[in-house]
Amino acid sequence: MLRISDDISIQDWELSESFVRASGPGGQNVNKVATAVELRFEAARSPSLPGPVKTRLRRLAGRRWTLEGALIIQCDETRSQARNREIARQRLVALVQKALVAPKRRIATKPTLGSKKRRLKAKKVRGEVKAMRGRVDPSD
């Protein structure tokens, strides 16, 4: 069981791990040992996550979200299979915790009269500077 917050935890049946050979440096070890981990979380079918959280999680996951509604997290940072597994689980927890936070609703406001006047004055000054950049008349 993976604990996300006080009231939300992910059951073991919702997670599946597969180990593959990692790419990159590592000598003979890379060719022999399957250290990279691919953690699959069945997010869409998860009873522990509320609907809005699933929606936010899907948006945050991006291309890590599959068509079947699973979230796939890959990790091949270290040469240790156990450490990669731990990192992948930490990433999943962080992602779900981020999805738990509902974004604040933006309150539309109007610009103040002073800010409008300052903006128009700055535009006028800038326009005058640019107007002075014309050709110089040789008769002057």
Image (tube, rainbow, N blue to C red):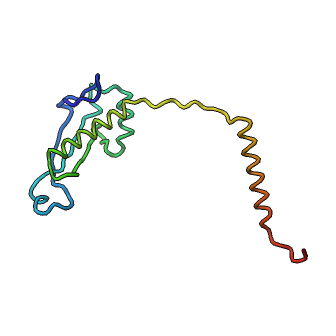
Quadrant in the picture for the C terminus? bottom right
Left or right: residue 55 compared with residue 129: left
Left or right: residue 32 compared with residue 91: left
Measured from the top left, where is residue 46 in percent x and y? 26, 29
Q: Residue furthest right?
A: 139
Q: Is residue 111 above or below residue 25?
A: above
Q: Is residue 7 above or below residue 131?
A: above
Measured from the top left, where is residue 7 in percent x and y? 29, 22
Query: What residue lies at 20% left-to-right and 28% top-to-bottom?
Result: 11
Query: What residue lies at 74% left-to-right and 51% top-to-bottom?
Result: 123
Measured from the top left, where is residue 27 in percent x and y? 13, 63
Quadrant in the picture for the N terminus? top left
Q: Nearer the viewer, residue 47 or 123?
A: 123
Query: What residue lies at 90% left-to-right and 76% top-to-bottom?
Result: 139
Left or right: residue 45 compared with residue 34: right
Q: Is residue 7 above or below residue 128?
A: above
Residue 136, quarter of the rendered image:
bottom right
Q: Residue furthest top?
A: 7
Query: What residue lies at 77% left-to-right and 47% top-to-bottom?
Result: 121
The total number of labels drawn is: 0
Residue 45, quarter of the rendered image:
top left
Measured from the top left, where is residue 57 in percent x and y? 35, 35
